[in-house]
Amino acid sequence: MELKPGTRLRSQVGPTEVVVVKSPGGDLALACGGQPMIPAGDVPAEGLTVAETASDSTQLGKRYTDPDERVELLVTKPGVGTLALDGVGLGLKQAKPLPASD
Amino acid sequence: MAITLLLDLAESMDPERLAVGLRQEEITAQRLSALTTGGAALIAASGARSVAFIGVNSPAFPVAMFAAARAGVPIAPLNYRLAEGALQELVARLDAPLVVVDEAYLPVVSGCGVPVLVTSEFMARCATEPAVDLPDVDDADPAVLLFTSGTTAAPKCVVLRHQNLQSYVLQTVEPGSAAEGDSALVSVPTYHVAGVGTVLTNVFAGRRLLYLPNFTPRSWLDLVRQEEVSFAMLVPTMLARILDELGGEVPDLPALRTLAYGGARMPQPVLERALRAFPAVDFVNAYGLTETSSTIAVLGPEDHRIAFSSDDPAVRARLGSVGRLIPGMEGQVRDFDRVVPAGEEGELWVRGEQVSGEYEGQGSVLDEAGWFPTRDRARMDEDGYVFVLGRSDDVIIRGGENIAPAEVEDVLLRHPGVAEVAVIGLPDEEWGECLAAVVVPATGAACDVEELREWVRSRLRSAKTPDRIVFRGELPHTDTGKLLRRKLYSEFTTAPAGS
């Protein structure tokens, strides 16, 4: 799926929703709970379940990224199901807060 | 979903957190969200294709801004201080607007032939309007229209799209990161890009927005104390007036942790006074333009402390920088088509998702690779600190040498007899341009032209010494603190000789 900053995606196996903060562009395979993520407005396929190997929970308002920090997602609705890029699980990003400026 | 995503996320993270207004008003994130849903229904039912907001700072502005976003129409906060005709011209430039207007400015727009709602009525109806189905809003749709202050020409209408504003906030703010009880005092007007940015960043961070409708230094100090404000943003002229009001007294504002400043160039002597007056406060210099969706570079608290306490001139000089570019932004300094190395002067170009660079009716001014010319003269040091020297248009070319007015102004401001100063270039037969300094003397100080010239000559050099110095009671500024150099220039060039 074509990913660009601002794109909103949802899980097919739970309530998880994310917004793309950073993306290198191009085709990227994002998954949640072992199933491909779909545009936030689309209806999930029936009968899909969370893969046992991808059953971590996502946290509301937290950022997730791959080890190379190519992709960054912000969780807008939490749920069960590990976020993954090209089959590799995403990790919680350490926040490096900027001082408030306006 | 667009920028309303920011409010929705803040609401889901902490619905009971106070979001806007005085504590006693008890407007929580959930309440704010509900008001914006009502407002969106109202806007959608009106058939308006844009919303004009003509009013002082109040909780009605964030309500109107998010309501317009939910309804999928852009909001244009207009400068209510403009002359009647000028304000009406701006309203006429908007596409089928619904005008939300403070009672005080109602007579100005009542003859415009467009639907009008008084702010208090708008707020009341936001609370009662039943929800309706709202359109899907595309990230590429316009969210905010801002008219530039037009210091040189007719105001240009900058288009900020949802994706620009959303990118700015998502790149720079952690959702819900503010501590319980934190608040941000907003003194910049709604029609300033910082007045827009502050709504988005503080709502997203979970920091209560508090408004000071008409700034005076005393009312600012009082409100900061009464409401235990933790963060405030000021334009440099406001900070200078607060320091004057304090007159050397140490303010008793224990809750205040951070002061951000921006919107115009900060004279270094004013900043040094501020750092001494507020030793326990974190200072943040925010640099940005309307066309870049607010802040693109930040000089943070640690930068300020290190620079202020350093004896190394190169480190100390960073107090005069706007800091480093924020995540998601790239910058280059160019001399015409050439990207110059660190340390060299040129024009600052920037690139990033938050940059709009687009004007209504004129299109985008970004180059093919997406770079935006800021029209600011700047240099960048090897660590990426950006030094903004002034607007490119203000650079004085004297005998082939580029002179940034700011450098000469800062030297003059250090003279005890000088309260305020502007340096401009005037036509000159010998040099092409010569330097004229317009000085506002400090109260009770005696100022001598030759003494001031010598003051500059001994600190800079003769090419940067003002050829003429005149004294005035005050300098012309826009109400958001920008010096009106053009106005001074035309006063000089149209005044009779010898003035």
Image: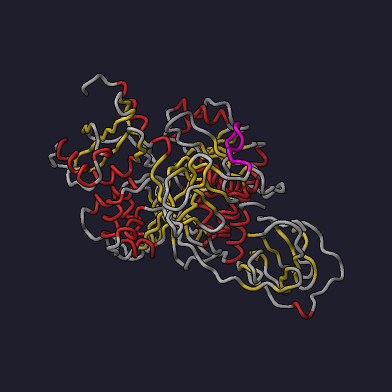
Residue A95 appears left or right of B103: right
**Residue B211 shows in the view:** no
Q: Quadrant of the C terminus of chain B?
A: top left
Q: Name the residue located 82 percent from the left edge and 63 percent from the top edge.
A: A44
Vertical position of residue B85 compared to residue B206: above or below: above
Q: Residue at x 47, y 55 (%)?
A: B209
Q: Is residue B197 magenta?
A: no
Whole-percent x, y for residue B340 in the image: 48, 48
Residue at the far top: name it: B496
Count the numbered circles shown.
0
Magenta segment's dominant SS is loop
Residue B363 covered by magenta stretch? yes
Q: Report whether B346 appears left or right of B370.
A: left
- The image shows residue B123 at horizontal and vertical percentages of 54, 46
Residue at the right extreme, as displayed? A47
**Which contiguous range is marked in magenta?**
B358-368
Residue drawn at x 47%, y 68% is B179
Q: Image quarter for residue B96?
A: top right
In this picture the colour scheme is: secondary structure
Where in the figure is residue A92, as x and y percent of width and height? 62, 72
Q: Nearer the viewer, residue A76 or B112?
A: A76
